[in-house]
Amino acid sequence: MKKILIINGHPNPDSFNFAIAESYKKGADASGAQVETITIADLNFNPNLKFGYQKRTELEPDLLESWEKIKRADHLVWIHPVWWGGLPAVAKGFIDRLFLPGMAFQYRENSVWWDKLLKGKTAHIITTLDQPGWFYRFSFGRPSVNQLKKSTLGFCGVKPVKVSYIGIIKNSDEKQRKKWLEKVYNFGVRNK
């Protein structure tokens, strides 16, 4: 049985991202997968990495519980909007506070290399846009995807990482949104 963790990085519970997360969950549940969720906006934690990596800030209980979920998962599903080319601040803060040396990766002593401590996990990034995905990719270089897929998940050993764009959200109608939710439901059924 595949263990899937859905991580919702949108701070607004009335957003379409919440419908996307729920649709994926329904599909994964229907497939018989074991599904857990993290709604970052519901967590009680300081998203600011106050001391950088010079001094460890103790992890709050919600972050400790989130890390246990990440460790248990085989497949991570990240759902978030693109704002100013990047992740919402609370999602970035979640990563800053939790994907730490000794947990997600480990630098080797006297070396430029590191050990990837999340090897064996896969991921799927489902991101919403107010522009076509191709435009985001070719005009801006898809900075949020590069950050999450390459600089975070890949750096920590998660691969492969699939990316799906959903949009244009701001101009979408109910019929279009229903099609997107069906597509995401099928991602869940296929555990992708």
Image: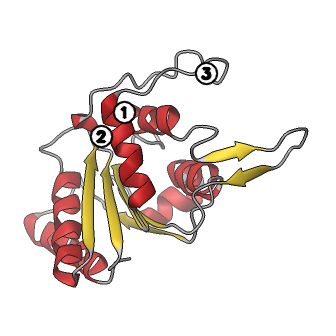
Dot 2 or dot 3, earlier in sequence = 2
Alpha carbon separation for disc pair 3 and 1? 16 Å
Circle 2: residue type: Ile
Classify 69 as above or below 184: above
Alpha carbon separation for disc pair 1 and 2? 7 Å
The residue to which callout 3 is attached is 52
> Pointers 1 and 2 in contact (CB under 8 A)?
yes
Mark 1 element type: helix
Where does residue 64 sit, x and y in percent of width and height?
Answer: 38, 37
Where does residue 76 sit, x and y in percent of width and height?
Answer: 41, 62
Where does residue 33 sit, x and y in percent of width and height?
Answer: 26, 76
Place residue 91 in its image quadrant. Answer: top left
Task: Give the residue furthest to the left.
Answer: 174
The residue to which callout 1 is attached is 90
Residue at the (43%, 42%) spot, across then down: 87
Dot 1 or dot 2, earlier in sequence = 2
